[in-house]
Amino acid sequence: MSTVLTLALKAPTLAYGPLVYAYYLQCAGPTASLSIAIDWKPVALIQPDNPASTAVLSVDGRDVVGPSDCVVELARLAESSLQGTETQTWLAFARDQLGPADHRALRGLLEQLDQHLVMRSFMTDHQLTAVDFAVWGILRGNRVFQSQVKAQSPLLGIHLLRWYTFVESQPCVTVALSDYYKAVDGAKNKLDQGKFDIPLQDAAMGKVVTRFPPEPSGYLHIGHAKAALLNQYFADKYQGKLIVRFDDTNPSKEKEEFEQSILHDLQLLGVKGSVVTHTSDYFDQIYQYALQIIRAGKAYVDDTDNQTMREERGAGIASKCRDLSVEENLRRFEEMTQGTPFGLSCCLRAKISVDNPNKAMRDPVIYRCNVAAPHHITGTKWKVYPTYDFACPIVDSLEGVTHALRTNEYRDRNPQYNWFFDALGIRKVHIWDYSRMNFVHTLLSKRKLQALVDAGVVAGWDDPRFPTVRGIRRRGLTIEALKQYIIMQGASQNILMLEWDKLWAVNKKVIDPIAPRHTAIPKDKLCQLTITDVADEPVMETVPKHKKNPKLGSKDLWKSKIVYVSTDDAAQFVEGEEVTLMDWGNVLIQKKHTNAQGVVDSVTASSNFQGDYKKTKLKITWLAAQYPQTNDTGLVDCVLCDYDYLITKRKLEEGDDWQNFVNPVTEFKTPAVGDTNLRALQQGDIIQLERTGYFICDKAWSKEDPCVYLILVPDGKAGSTTIKAESKPSA
């Protein structure tokens, strides 16, 4: 007999009843040998037109639809008796009354269940039956009931809660729920993650060579990180080689410092090339290929001014120089090589097409003069330099590259890339396209990022508002999270405008288990709370830095008669009610005192540290206000820094002047005081300020400058990744 229970993972409420009953029948019930396959579907309904189809039980080709009917059919398969008025009554109760019950109706139904279970351990028998799982499954999926269970609400009744807890504690239920959570995670990952597992054309194991060719004219940004990791992935997959090649063909923009920073960032990403090369290593060979293509009549030297050349290319008009003789072109190219006044007015263009619909094929420039700056490697040896479009296919061929990975924004240039192989008679290289990562409110153009640096909008290329690898690391993004996120994107061809929230959510999963917990309160929100029956002398206890990760060690927790709490918390205090001071205990609020502005600026309370923290509405952070007179104790001055997007528009359209959308206020600083343990932070340490957020230490404490700067790390929630422009005052 073939039996398959199919469950809809995206249903508003999972069909818990048939799920746990199926597991019970297979592992603990009277028919433990019964075999029921579970099939998880990432859909809301198994049968799109049937609202009951959150669960479908297929038995030898026959479908039973709906959670309740599935439970009944499972009982029939198990040869479990469902006869009797009481059994049928409670099955109907679960299906018709308990399932659709609203908040008001639920209370009476729960009282009915509690009364029924006063003298019973199970719903209808002396052991667990289908009725128990049918009723339990409905309650497990009811959010109101679950919130009351979590709060240990007396409205539930002790008998109902006892029965519900017993069913939930069954091993089969634990296994069923565990498998459900795994299925949810698996479906989510399958949906979110792209796939790199796509074969490369003509790829042979051990012979694949990829290359990552950054220009040393800026710092690596998040888009470059994807390119580097993708090239590394394929080189590793095919047990081949990755070449890190610096495309140093424009001495006016390139600097040695950029090369070193790129190599450092690649190291952080875990990307290590088999070899590091430079396009300039091949300048002699590229120059010879330029002479070859001129002699073949496939290139010409053009002295047309830039504006006219741009207009002619756009209109599909041939240059006046297009039909010059080979001899004249060689003479002119020599003048370019020597850097003569006439040569400096010229460029070398490939003779491909005048009016090709693909404008990348309209006689592109392949050599230019540049005498403005010496090359950072070759110095003043050369006055002419190849363009990337000309140098790239040549060096790819010379270095043995088998597969050139390029973002699909360059797809129009692919025919041009291939044309040079034919024109020069050199070995061809396969092109493999992938999509560029574009983010909302974000510039990735190095030219535009440089303009922001030059204008003083940001402090430098490692500014935490920048999408550079260094910038996002300074903002608190871990390299592990970045790698995970890029792998999730896969090798998709889709051009998407990505949100930042998912990247930061991945980062939160990485940092939360290892971020020590600390406390800080803004200086303008300090409220004194005096605990009248606590001794005047402050005392120190040692507590874990992270309750769930003892490996992180311990920290000092100072307690004193007077403590600071936030005025925001104090405003919610009710005289005569208890609140919980986290990591200490409960206090009873006696009196709130307000200032002239109506702000609570002081509170008196008495201790009840052994009180039940589960019964208090407010669990608040606090700081001791009194310390021994020593140099290594006391509150620490700190500045909490937050940032906004540099660009106010989500997506810049073609024709938009990006400078019109530069956010005028993007930095927000909040002076605060933090616990004494902040003195030990090192630059780059990531912590959690409890009830505030995750922060990375940007400047550590020192005796010379005893102030810690902490940068807020977005956690992926809407509030941390939405634009703050016009909604948050400037510091």
Image (spheres, grey):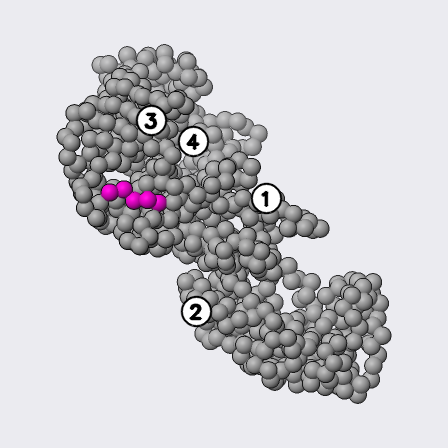
Which tag, 1 or 4, sits closer to the chain's start?
Answer: 4
Task: State the extent of the magenta-drawn residues as a range.
Answer: 634-638
The x, y position of residue 391, in whole percent, is 63, 75
Which tag, 3 or 4, sits closer to the chain's start?
Answer: 4
Work out how far the residue at label 4 is from the one at label 2, CA to CA, in angstroms: 46 Å
Looking at the rendered structure, the secondary structure element under dot 2 is loop
The residue positioned 19% from the left and 24% from the top of the image is: 532
Q: Quadrant of the N terminus?
A: top left
Disc 2 vs disc 1: which is toward the camera?
1
The x, y position of residue 452, in whole percent, is 57, 55
Which tag, 3 or 1, sits closer to the chain's start?
Answer: 3
The x, y position of residue 52, in whole percent, is 50, 26
Q: Total of numbered circles in the picture?
A: 4
Kindly identify which residue carries mark 3: 601
Which tag, 4 or 2, sits closer to the chain's start?
Answer: 4
The three-letter amino acid code for the residue at tag 2 is: Lys
Looking at the rendered structure, the secondary structure element under dot 1 is loop
Work out how far the residue at label 3 is from the one at label 1, CA to CA, in angstroms: 38 Å
- Of the numbered discs in the image, which one, if any, rests on residue 272? 2
Looking at the rendered structure, the secondary structure element under dot 3 is strand
Kindly identify which residue carries mark 1: 648
Q: Are marks 4 and 2 in contact (CB under 8 Å)?
A: no
Disc 3 vs disc 4: which is toward the camera?
3
Work out how far the residue at label 1 is from the one at label 4, CA to CA, in angstroms: 41 Å
The residue positioned 43% from the left and 31% from the top of the image is: 14
Work out how far the residue at label 2 is from the one at label 1, CA to CA, in angstroms: 37 Å
Which tag, 3 or 2, sits closer to the chain's start?
Answer: 2
Q: Nearer the viewer, residue 122 or 606?
A: 606
Work out how far the residue at label 3 is from the one at label 2, CA to CA, in angstroms: 57 Å
| Apparent side of residue 152 relative to residue 321 in the rendered image (left or right) | left
Vertical side of 432 occupied by 50: above or below: above
